[in-house]
Image: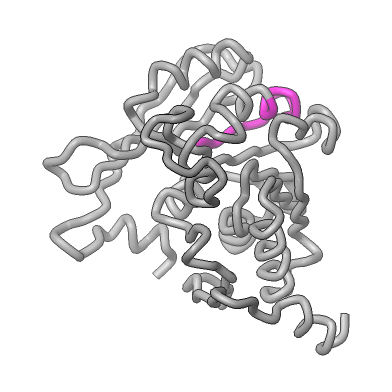
Amino acid sequence: MTQNQNSMITDLKPGERVDDLQRNGYHIIQDPKRFCFGMDAVLLSGFAQAGKGSRVLDLGTGTGIIPILMAAKTQAAELFGLEIQAESADMARRSVFLNHLENRITIAEGDIKEAGEKFDAASFDVITCNPPYMISQHGLQNPDNPKAIARHEVLCTLEDVVRAAAKLLKPGGKLYLVHRPFRLAEIIVTLHTYHLEPKRMKLVYPFIDHEPTMVLIEAVRGAKPRMTVDKPLIIYESQGKYTQEIYDIYGY
């Protein structure tokens, strides 16, 4: 690809900006009016594991943050991102080219509910997903708003994600999720239903004396029951100051 072609792909559109990811010199194109990645995506990329040469899929990739971070921290051979919103998928593709990762990362536009038609069954070693947390219409005002689609189960549900992962993972393949603790019972039941066995869990707390606000889960296709609960992850040591573990995840 020529420099001129690369420039055409990565030219910013109105409202977009380029953010430094502080990893491997990588950057990402985002539009604050649509949706910008948060701490949950970073923590999921830090929790997920992908071996050398593995094939990884991120369901609902948004602007491609998780495949890009996974490219920085793992030796996965191929990383794919599936995104239903055309504008977000376009930003993700341009970020991939901006970081010269087009030989490792492929962004596909499509619906998670139809992922089994877009990709071959049992073809991935690892699947990651940072799905919408809120159930359907709970507190929803504008279902067409990109931020609402990212936060609420407007276009896909937890079960849609788990069903797709169960179909696309190889036997022994791993699904990594970040979600909210208030839905933990539902998450575990849904994983069991689709023969994805929860094997590892980590609760994330904003401060050591607060309730957890996130849960990270690793589930394995076809595994036997037995789950390990990792030590909790604390985000802030004090107001505005991250703990060392957070700095380690960010790669500082």
Q: Say which residue appears at 67% left-offset and 59% top-offset.
A: 87
Observer-nearest of 120 and 17? 17
Observer-nearest of 225 and 12? 12
Q: How many marks?
A: 0
Relative to residue 247, is residue 147 drawn left or right? right
Which quadrant is home to the C terminus?
bottom left
Q: Which residues are magenta?
A: 164-177
Which quadrant is home to the N terminus?
bottom right
How far from the left and from the top, in percent, is residue 82?
71, 46
Relative to residue 250, is residue 8 drawn left or right? right
How far from the left and from the top, in percent, is residue 2?
87, 86
* Residue 205 picture quarter: top left
Q: Say which residue appears at 34% left-offset and 63% top-offset.
A: 247
Q: Residue furthest bottom?
A: 4
How far from the left and from the top, in percent, is residue 5?
84, 82
The figure's colour scheme reads one colour
Relative to 10, say whether 121 is above or below.
above
Relative to residue 4, is residue 146 drawn left or right? left
Query: Within the magenta stretch, is there residue 221?
Result: no
Q: Say which residue appears at 17% left-offset and 57% top-offset.
A: 237
Relative to 225, say whether 69 is above or below.
below
> Magenta region, mostly helix, strand or loop?
strand
Q: Say which residue appears at 55% left-offset and 18% top-offset.
A: 191
Observer-nearest of 173 and 67? 67
* Residue 230 picture quarter: top left
Observer-nearest of 64 and 33? 33
